[in-house]
């Protein structure tokens, strides 16, 4: 059944939802069809076994995971977004898809060493360093030895409203590229890490009844657990 009730944001609690009814949005993700470098990496790298799509939202990259993984758990705090993800998943893939409401800042409701891979994009830059350390510790707990992490991390973000003013989300750190790269290498010091630096050209985002233009630099990381 479709879940239409929006999950309102509570940014003081690090809940960065969009506060929208996803059943009223276009079939494609509100964030677009996907970043070119991320899509190319998803095609190129080996993806097998059971994967966790963490903070999956309305499924921007979920189909790319389903095409290669044996099973995908798509998790997000916003049930309306997950409902859209499920409704838009082709029937041939639904047997190997589970959706689960998960608050990324709380204990993950999964067993230790239960995933061969963890995927997370468009989210981790929203949290201060102390929360990020906790999130990465929980990712490490649920990831098998020799498992793989695939994440991105936005930096130098600009959100420009139609009147030219900047839109800044409350509680969001403003990471620069150099600072974020150093921090991520520290968090993943026990992993074999490959880093690609890229950027998102200006694109229009429609959310919560208003529109803004978004651009950023970002770090794309593949990390294999030793």
Image: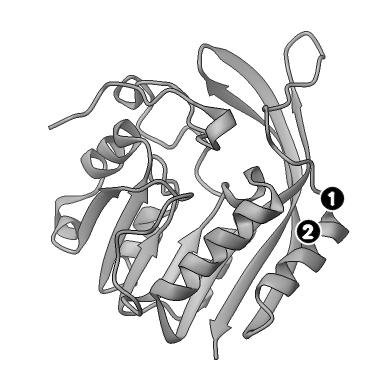
Query: Based on the displayed image, in which of its 4 quarters is residue 53 positioned?
Result: bottom left
Residue receiving disc 1: 176
x then y, percent, for residue 181: 79, 65
Tell whether label 2 touches label 1 (CB within 8 Å): yes
Name the foreground residue: 92 vs 148.
148
Taking the image as shown, residue 163 lies to the left or right of residue 15, namely right
- Mark 1–mark 2 Cα distance, whole angstroms, equals 6 Å
Secondary structure, mark 1, is: loop
Residue assigned mark 2: 180
Q: Nearer the viewer, residue 99 or 29?
A: 99
State which quarter of the image contains the C terminus.
Answer: bottom right
The quarter of the rendered structure image containing the N terminus is top left
Query: Residue 132, image x and y in percent?
Result: 62, 56
Q: In the rendered image, is residue 35 in sight?
A: no
- Residue drawn at 51 percent across, 11 percent down: 209
Where residue 108 sits in the image (x, y, percent)? 37, 59
Residue at horizontal 56 percent and vertical 60 percent from the top: 134
């Amino acid at each position: 059944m479709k879940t239409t009730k929006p999950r309102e944001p509570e940014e003081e609690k690090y809940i960065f939802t969009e506060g929208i009814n996803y059943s009223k949005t276009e079939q494609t993700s509100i964030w677009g069809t996907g970043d070119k470098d991320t899509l190319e990496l998803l095609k190129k790298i080996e993806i097998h076994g059971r994967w966790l799509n963490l903070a999956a939202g309305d499924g921007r990259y979920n189909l790319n995971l389903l095409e290669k993984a044996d099973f995908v758990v798509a998790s997000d705090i916003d049930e309306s977004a997950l409902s859209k993800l499920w409704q838009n998943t082709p029937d041939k893939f639904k047997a190997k898809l589970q959706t689960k409401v998960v608050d990324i800042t709380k204990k993950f409701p999964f067993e230790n060493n239960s995933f061969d891979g963890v995927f997370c994009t468009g989210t981790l830059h929203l949290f201060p360093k102390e929360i990020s350390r906790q999130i990465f510790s929980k990712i490490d707990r649920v990831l098998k030895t020799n498992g793989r992490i695939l994440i991105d991390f936005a930096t130098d973000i600009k959100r420009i409203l139609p009147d030219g003013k900047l839109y800044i989300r409350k509680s969001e750190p403003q990471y620069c590229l150099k600072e974020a790269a150093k921090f991520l290498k520290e968090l993943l010091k026990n992993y074999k890490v490959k880093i690609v630096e890229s950027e998102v050209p200006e694109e229009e985002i429609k959310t919560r009844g208003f529109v803004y233009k978004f651009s950023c630099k970002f770090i794309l990381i593949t990390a294999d657990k030793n």
